[in-house]
Amino acid sequence: MPKVLLFHFPPSGSKGLFPISLGYIAATLINQGIDTLLEDLAIDKPKSLKQIVNLIEKFHPQIVGLSVCQYNMREVLAIAELAKKINPRIVTIIGGSHATFMPKEALLEMPSIDVICKGEGEVVLPALCECVKYKRGMETVKGIVFRKDNIVVETKQEKLKKDLDDFPSPYQIGIFDFPEYTIGTILTS
């Protein structure tokens, strides 16, 4: 299976903000035997772009996933561009509220981004890993927008899961170092 590197960019001054969404995605991937690293840039090193380049070169991911909101758009695009410079075959995927608002338009404006996740990352990322592993087209992955031959393609949305217990918990597999996280998280939609 391909290696997946996930990045969390918190708002400035928000050290300790718990990245629960990426935690669930990482737990799902790890539970399926996919080598996954979640890099929380509020807590973890590296901090500089050079250190991030070193991390990408050392880990050798085939997929780089980034959670994007309005406040971190510049940083997300910078990391995606770095990943593509290191290895143009890395598949870059973004998700989150900003990415899903106008996904087709966003993809056209961001050449360093390959895929936008509109659905649940816990479902989309494992399916995308299968596509990368077996060198298949992404048309079968539900809930994404991607480029194919310079045309933006949007797949059908997967029905959302109603029960979080369908996904493995990031708490139970030790993804987070709890003393580092001091701010509670509430997710709503």
Image (tube, helix red, strand yellow):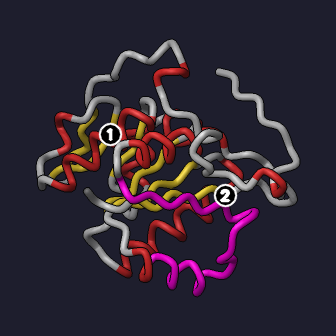
Residue 181 as seen in the image, left or right of residue 149:
right
Secondary element type, mark 2: loop
Disc 2: CA contacts within 10 A as few (<14), some (14-19) or many (>=20): many
- At horizontal 49% and vertical 35% (from top left) the residue drawn is 100
Pinpoint residue 173: horizontal percent, then vertical percent.
Answer: 57, 45
- At horizontal 66% and vertical 58% (from top left) the residue drawn is 9
Q: Is residue 42 magenta?
A: yes
Question: Could you tell me the amino acid type at mark 2?
Answer: Phe
Q: Marks 1/2: CA distance? A: 22 Å
Disc 1: CA contacts within 10 A as few (<14), some (14-19) or many (>=20): many
On residue 145, the disc is 1
Q: Is residue 162 magenta?
A: no
Front disc: 1 or 2: 2
Q: Nearer the viewer, residue 13 or 151?
A: 13
Secondary element type, mark 1: strand
Residue 57 as seen in the image, left or right of residue 169:
left
- At horizontal 43% and vertical 75% (from top left) the residue drawn is 59
On screen, 57 above or below 16? below
Pinpoint residue 118: horizontal percent, then vertical percent.
Answer: 43, 33
- At horizontal 46% and vertical 55% (from top left) the residue drawn is 65
Q: Nearer the viewer, residue 63 or 28?
A: 28
Residue 135 as seen in the image, left or right of residue 88:
left
Question: Could you tell me the amino acid type at mark 1?
Answer: Val
On residue 9, the disc is 2
Residue reaching furthest to the top: 162
Pinpoint residue 92: horizontal percent, then vertical percent.
Answer: 38, 58
Q: Earlier in the sequence, mark 1 or mark 2?
A: 2
Q: Quadrant of the N terminus?
A: bottom left
Residue 39 as seen in the image, left or right of residue 182:
left
Question: Quadrant location of residue 153?
Answer: top left
Question: Quadrant location of residue 40?
Answer: bottom right
Q: Which residues are magenta?
A: 34-56
